Structures are given as C-alpha cells and as structure tokens.
Image: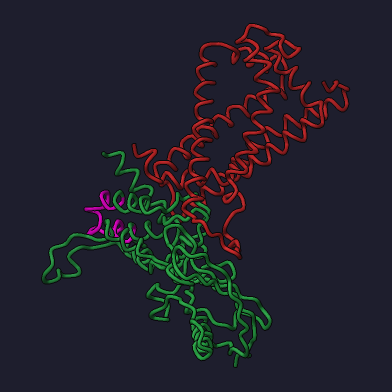
C-alpha cells in the first residue's frame, strides 16, 4: 500500500488527516463562539451533539483521525531520525528561511495532544461520556450544560493559562501544517507557496483567536461576576 | 588586497565507515583572504605531508562550482556560510582573524563516511539509474525546433537541471531526505515533452529507490532550499509529490 510504504504516501496521510482536523477545529471554534452570544443557544448545540448516534459516529471518526495523525507522526519521526544517521553535527546553524515550527512539529504536536487530554477531562468526560455511561451529573452539572462547564472551567486562572499555552502551540503547529499539507499534496508552486503561507497564517490566526476569545471572555466575566473556581 | 588571517581549524578525522571519528585541531597561520576554502585545506595537507603526517581526505574536482564533488559542512552550513555557492567557491575572506572553523563531513545514513571528510554519494547515482533519464532512439539528432517548448517551461526545467547532485540538501535536512535532489531530477524531465512520456514511471521508480536507500521523509522545513548551492526551489518537491500521487492514483 503506497500510503504506508512510500515516503510521499506517508506524508499524504499526515496531510489529509491534518487538513480534516483543521476543518474540525474550524467547526468547533464556530460552535464555541455561540457561547459568547447565547447560553441557551450553546446548550442546544451541546444537547444536539450529546450521546446521539450521529455524534458518536462523528466522534469515533474524529478519534481515528487523531490517532492516525499521531501514530504516523511518531513513525515518521523515528524513520527520519534513523535516516539522519548515528553521528550528529557538532555545530549547527539554522538558515533564516527555516521556520522554528517546521523543525519542532512533533514537540508542538505533543503539547497539543496534552492540551487535548486536559480538554477531554474538562468537558468531554463530563458531557458526552457522562451521557454514554448514563450518569448525566457525573461532572457536577447536567451533561448538556456546556455553558455551565465553560463558566466553571474558565473561572480558574490555572485553566485559562493552560488553555492559552495550548492554543499558542496549536497556532505554531498550524502555521507550518497548513501550507505544508498542501505542499505535500502537490498543490503548490512558487506562486501558490506564498499564497498558501499567507492564507494559512490568516486562517490559523482567526481560528486560534476564536478559541482564545471564549477563554478570555469567560475569565473576565468570572472576575466581575464572581463565579467560583472549582 | 585581502588581509591574511590566522585561525583554529577543527577537522573531523575518521579512518573508515565503521571506525569511530573525532575532531583534530590545527592552527592555521597567515592564510591570505583570497585563498579558497579548498586551497586552504591544500595548504594544511602540504604542512601535514611535510611533517610526515597523514593528510586530511576531502572530495573535490572542478573547483569552479559545477561538478558537485566538493562537500564539507562548515560552521553549521553545508558548503559553508556563503549562499548559492559550493565549498570551492568559498573564500577565506569570509572568516575573521582568531575564528574557530569547524569542518565536518555530510552526516546522513544515506551517505556513509569513506574517510575523514569524504562521504559515499553513490546513492545518488543509484537513484539516477532508477529513472533519471529518457529513453530515446540514438542516431542523428532531430532538428531542435521540431518540438516547440514554451519559454517558461524551458526556464523552469533548466533551473531544475542546474542541480549538481552534491548532496547538500541531504546534509542540511534534519530528516536526511533527498527529496530536493530527486524532485529536481524528476522536474527537469517532467517539464519537457520528451520527458513526459515516462514521467509516471520515473517518479515512482526514483522515489522508491530513494526510500529504499534509507533517506528520510520530507517534512517541508525548507532547509534544503536555503542551503542548496544552486538555489533549487522546493516548488520542485511539490511537483514531484504531484507526479507521484497522480501516478499512484492511476494505478
């Protein structure tokens, strides 16, 4: 199978799963923005995306994408370290055109995955998982009260800081990942390279700002309205 | 007139592919600035020979930047700190009095060290043999204007063909990937009508040879493009990806 036994094939898998995950992030970010506008509206979405068959199928597919992306990342890194040989250079210099993110995608990815773990514990475990096991008040609030969990989580400064670090890592990961994915699929040349880079930077910044806005707004709200940090 | 400089030279010495290597330090005195880097190593070797010591082994041939034989990883850069130039085109005026200059061989699993600074780059020849050619009937040449080629395509193909196969891309790549080389060699033919006929077979054969020889997977860091003495663009890598994916989807 060329998707596993050729270098370009393996990169195509990284690229396609990566693009799919960027699309998911776009959806998730748009959904979060509803929480800024209406608590009821947000909870309707949470109910809609609870333990229903379609949401569970989509979640499983999403989990598969994440797992494939991570497994391939480690596999590629191991192969690449082997290809580098046993001796390392004594002196190394980084050319100016080489982005820092591009050489640290695995490390950034690990930070992103760690943030994902925290996020699943903060929200998914208390919401969808609580519904699956039939204990809707597992996290203290109703499983469909996503708004309540947002208020609760982001009234804690520690979570605010952790989430912002997570989002910063995601920004670096995506600024390289975006154009790199299209380059790997062959949809690039001297002109499109510059275009994809610019589009990727703008797109990534908007997505990350959208996520960060919810974190910051709810933290500020908790400061003035005195919501308690649990 | 350039000034003379004196500096410390740290050179990698290694007796054979399986031997353990180490750095050896030399003090170089009063080297004129208009000495090329390779001439400086010649001076060092003359000194070593006159002291009845073993000279440093390094690759070189034309010494005018077109053969692709010289290599050397100097102070963290393949072909040294100059851009768009090979080691033989690097002059000592780039360095300062009192500098420490570290010289290492290309380090990659695909290019094992033969001795000291010389590495085995026959992997590139094997990749070329896998498909870096076109099959034509030999004999009297056709009229050059029989096949018309748009000027932009001809230029792009010529830019790709300027790759001299020195291996700086592999040396610069944190993944030890030879994608810039393979993509330039695929592009120079894929862009022209004569090369299009075998384009799909060529892309598959050259890439699988590259993988087989232990080169890494490209992660688009662009270090190869930055260090290439012929400034080959990574847009060639996008073209190779395109050619390869198209060929695989057709199968």
Asked whether residue B50 is drawn in magenta, I would say no
Q: Please say if A95 is above or below A56.
A: below
Q: Is A216 left, or right, of A105 in this rendering? A: right
- Image quadrant in which you'd find residue A130: top right
The residue at 49%/41% (across/down) is A75
Residue B55 location (% of width, % of height): 48, 82
Is residue B81 at least partly visible in the picture?
A: no
The residue at 57%/59% (across/down) is A97
- Image quadrant in which you'd find residue A98: bottom right
In the image as oriented, which residue stretches furthest toward the bottom? Answer: B1
Give the green chain's letter: B
Dominant SS of magenta comes to helix
Q: Is B239 left, or right, of A74 in this rendering? A: left
**For the magenta stretch, what is the residue range?**
B187-203
Give the red chain's letter: A
Residue B146 location (% of width, % of height): 17, 65
In the image as oriented, which residue stretches furthest toward the left? Answer: B139
Residue A58 location (% of width, % of height): 51, 20
The residue at 58%/66% (across/down) is B76
Is residue B38 at least partly visible in the picture?
A: yes
In which quadrant of the rendered image does the C terminus of chain B lie? top left
Residue B153 location (% of width, % of height): 33, 61
Q: Is A149 left, or right, of B52 in this rendering? A: right
In which quadrant of the rendered image does the N terminus of chain B lie? bottom right
């Amino acid at each position: 199978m060329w998707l596993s036994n050729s270098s370009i094939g393996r990169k195509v898998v990284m690229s396609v799963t990566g693009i799919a995950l960027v699309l998911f992030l776009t959806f998730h970010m748009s959904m979060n923005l509803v929480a800024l506008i209406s608590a009821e509206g947000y909870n309707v979405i949470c109910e809609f995306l609870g333990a229903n068959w379609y949401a569970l199928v989509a979640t499983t597919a999403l989990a598969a994408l994440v797992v494939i992306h991570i497994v391939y990342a480690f596999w590629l890194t191991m192969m690449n370290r082997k290809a580098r040989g046993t001796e390392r250079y004594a002196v190394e210099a980084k050319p100016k055109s080489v982005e820092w993110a591009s050489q640290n995608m695995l490390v950034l990815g690990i930070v992103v995955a760690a943030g994902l773990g925290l996020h699943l514990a903060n929200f998914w475990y208390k919401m969808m998982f609580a519904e699956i096991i039939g204990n809707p008040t597992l996290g203290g609030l109703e499983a469909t009260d996503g708004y309540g969990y947002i208020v609760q989580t982001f009234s804690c400064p520690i979570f605010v800081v952790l989430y912002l670090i997570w989002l910063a890592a995601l920004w670096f990961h995506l600024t390289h990942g975006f154009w790199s994915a299209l380059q790997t699929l062959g949809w690039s040349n001297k002109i499109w390279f510059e275009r994809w880079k610019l589009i990727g930077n703008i797109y990534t910044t908007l997505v990350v700002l959208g996520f960060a806005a919810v974190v910051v707004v709810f933290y500020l709200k908790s400061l003035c309205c005195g919501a308690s940090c649990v | 007139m350039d000034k003379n400089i004196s500096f410390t030279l740290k050179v990698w010495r290694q007796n054979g592919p399986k031997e353990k290597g180490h750095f050896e330090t030399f003090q170089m005195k009063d080297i004129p600035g208009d000495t090329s880097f390779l001439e400086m190593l010649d001076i060092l070797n003359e000194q070593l020979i006159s002291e009845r010591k073993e000279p440093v082994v390094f690759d070189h041939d034309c010494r005018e930047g077109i053969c692709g034989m010289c290599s050397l990883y100097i102070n963290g850069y393949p072909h040294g700190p100059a851009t768009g130039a090979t080691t033989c085109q690097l002059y000592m005026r780039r360095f300062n009095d009192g500098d420490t200059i570290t010289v290492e061989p290309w380090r990659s699993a695909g290019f094992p060290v033969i001795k000291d600074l010389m590495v085995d780059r026959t992997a590139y020849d094997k990749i070329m043999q896998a498909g870096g050619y076109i099959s034509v009937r030999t004999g009297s040449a056709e009229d050059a204007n029989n096949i018309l080629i748009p000027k932009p395509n001809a230029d792009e193909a010529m830019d790709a063909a300027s790759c001299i196969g020195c291996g700086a891309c592999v040396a610069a790549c944190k993944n030890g990937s030879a994608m810039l080389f393979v993509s330039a060699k695929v592009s120079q033919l894929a862009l022209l009508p004569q090369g299009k006929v075998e384009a799909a077979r060529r892309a598959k054969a050259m890439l699988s040879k590259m993988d087989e020889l232990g080169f890494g997977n490209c992660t688009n860091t662009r270090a190869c493009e930055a260090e290439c003495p012929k400034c080959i663009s990574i847009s060639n890598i996008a073209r190779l990806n395109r050619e390869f994916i198209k060929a695989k989807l057709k199968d």
